[in-house]
Image (cartoon, rainbow, N blue to C red):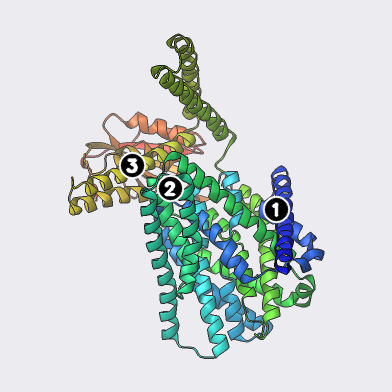
Amino acid sequence: MDIGHTILEAERIVLLLLLIALVVSIVAKRFRMPYTVGLVLIGLALTPFQAKVEISPELILGLLVPPLLFEAAFHIRIDDLRRDLWLIMLLAIPGVIVTTLLVAGAIHWGTGIALSTTLIFGALIAATDPVAVVALFKQLGVPKRLQILLEGESLFNDGTAIVMFGLMLEIAISGNFSLTQSLIDFVTVAGGGVLVGLVLGLLASQIIGRIDDALVETTITTTLAFGAYLIGEEIGVSGVLAVVVAGIVNGNIGPRGMSPTTRIVVNNFWEYAAFLANSLIFLLIGLTTDFQSLLDNWQAIGVAIIATLGARAVGIYGFSHFGKDIPTKWKHILYWGGLRGAIVLALALSIPTSFVDRERLLAMAFGVVLFTLLVQGFSMDALVNRMQLINRTKIQERYERRHARFVANRAAADHLEKMSKQGLLSAHIWQQMQPIFTKREIILIEALKEILAANPAVEIEELDAARREALRVQRASLGGLFRDGVISEETYGDLIREVDEALTEQHVNWSQLLQVGTGKKVEIKKMMAVIIQDEDLQNALRALSNAGFGVDQLPSTGGFLSQRNVTLLIAIPEGREEDIVRVLKRSCNKRVEHVRAPLEGAFLPISRPVPVDVGGATIFTFDVEAYHEF
């Protein structure tokens, strides 16, 4: 009877939390505020009821975190991750270690808390949770690569931070420290988690490929998410890293064996599971906050916040120099987007109750989490707008609507035509309806062309997406040829490397990469020097590379007050000079001046033209006797 009463009480609490989450979701969307921030605020407002809700680290780490990690990892494409994998790993491993040491040292110096204790806090606070930021990114249309950087770092540094936390806690309790043994333990726990996730992810993907049942396949992914965590923890390795790796592997291999219907079911299920877990986690953060403890430890919390922000700055601005072409604006977003959340609180709550300074560490953890969620989470929208990173313009939205209408129109026409051929629709009716669909398709195609012609950035984005999809299909077809014995393992390896290299290119010639390995050479008799301002550089590079023109960059200064700009050297294929000029005019926001005169500079031994002062780009064309690529 007592058990039944407990279950009924738990059911009431969960239903109440879900009802609150539903209301917050509607209100947050209405007022364009981060959903997770709204949940925390409501949770704080409901603190008088917190005695009825108890939170445990096992509840968070074992039940709520796996679906969050798996859903995020499942939707990360390997080729997107591979592009910045080096930087992500730097932030997730050395970055976590640096954060742990800097935060621990600063708090020890600022509060006098024992260093062994502050090392525990430094490790647990290193785990980031950008759920609110990533949701905002998707809503605003922030560049996909920036989303992958932030989310990829979070997925991997969560696992690293948990491993570090376990080591620091063990050292503090036992009083024994061995650098060699600590490194061995770290590699064993982290590497073991990766291995468990890899094996389980591959196994689940193989099983999914042999089954054609949406419900069964969804159940397999659910078992994988929770099973990877439980197995990892049971054998003494990182369950979090096991879930992350299993999600990435299954998300990239599993869908190949799924029918379109199954993919939709699986994606919808995990989207809802993540929403549910997020709702409960962030409500519980607010509900379990002890205001009196925060007030009693306000000085330590202040030092912890400053130390956390400082360590984040060192990690992001220091390690991002090793990344490929990371814009400064992106570094600012990565820095401010380092929010803390569920895993930080779960680790803090898992500190043994007998541990000295446990209550102070809990207060500091809650203080930092609340600061990052409420201050950084609330201000991220304004920062993204200030950095001018929003790609989703009104023009892009209009293009998406027209494109969706075009796809829907064609799908309807194809379906009715198929019905007509099967005898399910009379030929007379189809003959009457076909001209209507055809006319509408022509109108929509012209409308799409109009937008693309006036807005090259939209066209470039779709070209890049098409290029990547084509390369993925090439990669899959090569795998089929190898499995069928049509090509040897050596040939397969060589061809796969070519495609993978093409997928990792940031600025690419998409038309050439669709024909990887052709080795076709174009005779070059002219070169073009383009002096372009920073604000137009990225658009111009993408437009030129997607149009098939090779580009080299030279940093330069010029104009009023020696303004920073970049000189682009472009090899001109025969008869393509005007094409390059046209691409530049379409991709630059400001006016482009084409100067058909020789020039003399430090790097080109030819005569100087009359100076031309323009805002966007200045183009100089000159003949070359020979052209070689190195």
Label 1: state its secondary structure: helix
Q: Earlier in the sequence, mark 2 or mark 1?
A: 1
Q: For this view, does 112 lie left or right of residue 578?
A: right
Q: Residues within 10 Å of mark 3 (few under 14, many from 20)?
A: few
Quarter of the N terminus within the rendering: bottom right
In the rendered image, is residue 309 in sight? Answer: no
Q: What separation in Å lies between label 1 and label 3 (alpha carbons)?
A: 41 Å
In the rendered image, the vertical position of residue 421 relative to residue 57, given as above or below: above
Q: Which residue is mark 3?
A: 473
Q: Which residue is mark 2?
A: 566
Q: For this view, does 119 lie left or right of residue 238?
A: right
Nearest-to-viewer mark from 3 and 2: 3
Near-viewer residue (274 or 630): 274
In the rendered image, the vertical position of residue 333 relative to residue 547, given as above or below: below
Where in the figure is residue 304, as x and y percent of width and height?
A: 66, 74
Nearest-to-viewer mark from 1 and 3: 1
Q: Residue furthest front?
A: 1
Nearest-to-viewer mark from 2 and 1: 1
Q: Earlier in the sequence, mark 1 or mark 3?
A: 1
Q: Which residue is mark 1?
A: 18
Near-viewer residue (337 or 73): 73
Three-letter code, disc 2? Val
Q: Residues within 10 Å of mark 2 (few under 14, many from 20)?
A: some
Three-letter code, disc 1? Leu
